[in-house]
Amino acid sequence: MYTIGEAAINTGISAHTLRYYEKLGLLPEPERQNGHKRLYSKKDMAFIMFLKTLKDTGMPLEEMKEFVQDGCIWDSREEDPDYKAVPVLTKRVNILEKHLRNMEEKKRELEGIMMITKEKLQTYYTLLEEDAKR
């Protein structure tokens, strides 16, 4: 089990953010030691890393919340052999497809900005060479 400080160090997500994610409902309330200190399991840590991955791709917190609100599909299937994952899977596929389209658009925008930056750099390199020859 990991304290919130250890979880923060191991995941790269601050303790403040972990508490905020809990408050938003992104993270389930963790176990508590003597009713006080938060304790995170290895499974919790893996889920936190998953949230970090979503956040690192630029997914807004509201979409992240919608994505995780139905809980873990694997756990649901283990708990209920008749569990039908199709609605949850369909919702998650839709969220990820939309997010991927957004990331692809941002990538195109960034590539355009990078091209302009490279052109500007080339202009400056040329000017530097010309000035050096004087």
Image (cartoon, rainbow, N blue to C red):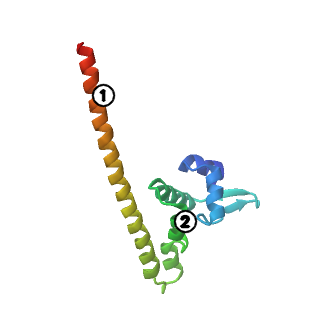
| Quadrant assignment, res 106 | bottom left
Q: Amino acid at mark 1?
A: Tyr
Image position, residue 121 (x, y; %): 31, 32
Residue 18 left/right relative to 132: right
Disc 2 packing (10 Å; few <14; some 14–19; many ≥20): few
> Which structural element holds mark 1?
helix
- Quadrant, the C terminus: top left
Q: Which mark is residue 124?
A: 1
Tell me the residue at 54%/75% (across/down): 70
- Tell us which disc is closer to us: 2 or 1: 1
- Quadrant, the N terminus: bottom right
> Which structural element holds mark 2?
helix
Q: How many marks?
A: 2
Tell me the residue at 52%/74% (across/down): 75
Q: Amino acid at mark 2?
A: Glu
| Quadrant assignment, res 97 | bottom left
Q: Is residue 1 visible?
A: no
Is residue 121 positioned above or below 6 on the image? above
Where does label 2 land, which residue?
Answer: 62
- Please state which of residues 133 and 52 is positioned toward the viewer in this rendering: 133
Q: Is residue 58 visible?
A: yes
Residue 11 left/right relative to 5: left
Q: Are marks 2 and 1 in contact (CB under 8 Å)?
A: no
Image position, residue 49 (x, y; %): 51, 56
Q: Residue furthest top?
A: 134
Residue 91 left/right relative to 125: right
Tell me the residue at 25%/26% (across/down): 126
Residue 48 left/right relative to 57: right
- Please state which of residues 131 and 2 is positioned toward the viewer in this rendering: 131
Which tag, 2 or 1, sits closer to the chain's start? 2
Disc 1 packing (10 Å; few <14; some 14–19; many ≥20): few
